[in-house]
Amino acid sequence: MPFSKSFARNVPGTNYPIWEEVVLTSEEEKEVEEQCKRENLILMNECLLEAKALAIKYGVNTDENMVRLGIALFEKRASHVVFWKENKAKEKFDGKDK
């Protein structure tokens, strides 16, 4: 099932927006998913390196603590695929105005 998102378009002279649905193509979805994967791998690597530095700084530098800190940092920062798809849909929607 393709990803879709609805956006409100304001119409001059009325108080009610018109809702428009934007649907991503399979190619757009795959592109966004791949971009998300690449970014998440980079982010996880950064989180693990920062976790190691924090663990050493605070004297809790066991492998288990470093992994737990890395995962906690990643979960806090990580973007989910839906967020990326919503951004792509918003880009498509905003492109209609031009």
Image: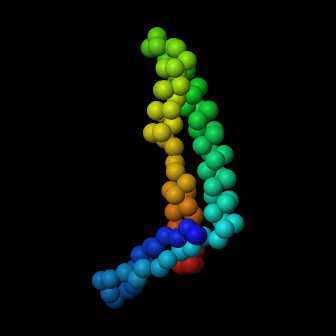
Task: Specify the quadrant of the image occupied by residue 49.
Answer: top right
Q: Residue at x 51, y 37 (%)?
A: 74
Task: Specify the quadrant of the image occupied by residue 39.
Answer: top right
Could you tell me residue 5's position as x and y percent? Answer: 49, 70
The vertical placement of 61 against 67, above or below, is above
Q: Residue at x 52, y 14 (%)?
A: 62
Q: Is residue 22 left or right of residue 17?
A: right
Out of 45 and 12, give the one closest to the viewer: 45
Q: Residue at x 57, y 73 (%)?
A: 23
Out of 72 and 96, give the one closest to the viewer: 72
Task: Specify the quadrant of the image occupied by residue 32.
Answer: bottom right
Tell which residue pokes out farthest to the bottom in this image.
Answer: 13
Q: Is residue 15 left or right of residue 79?
A: left
The vertical placement of 8 against 31, above or below, is below
Could you tell me residue 19's position as x and y percent? Answer: 42, 79
The vertical placement of 69 against 3, above or below, is above
Could you tell me residue 44's position as x and y percent? Answer: 58, 35
The vertical placement of 35 against 91, above or below, is above
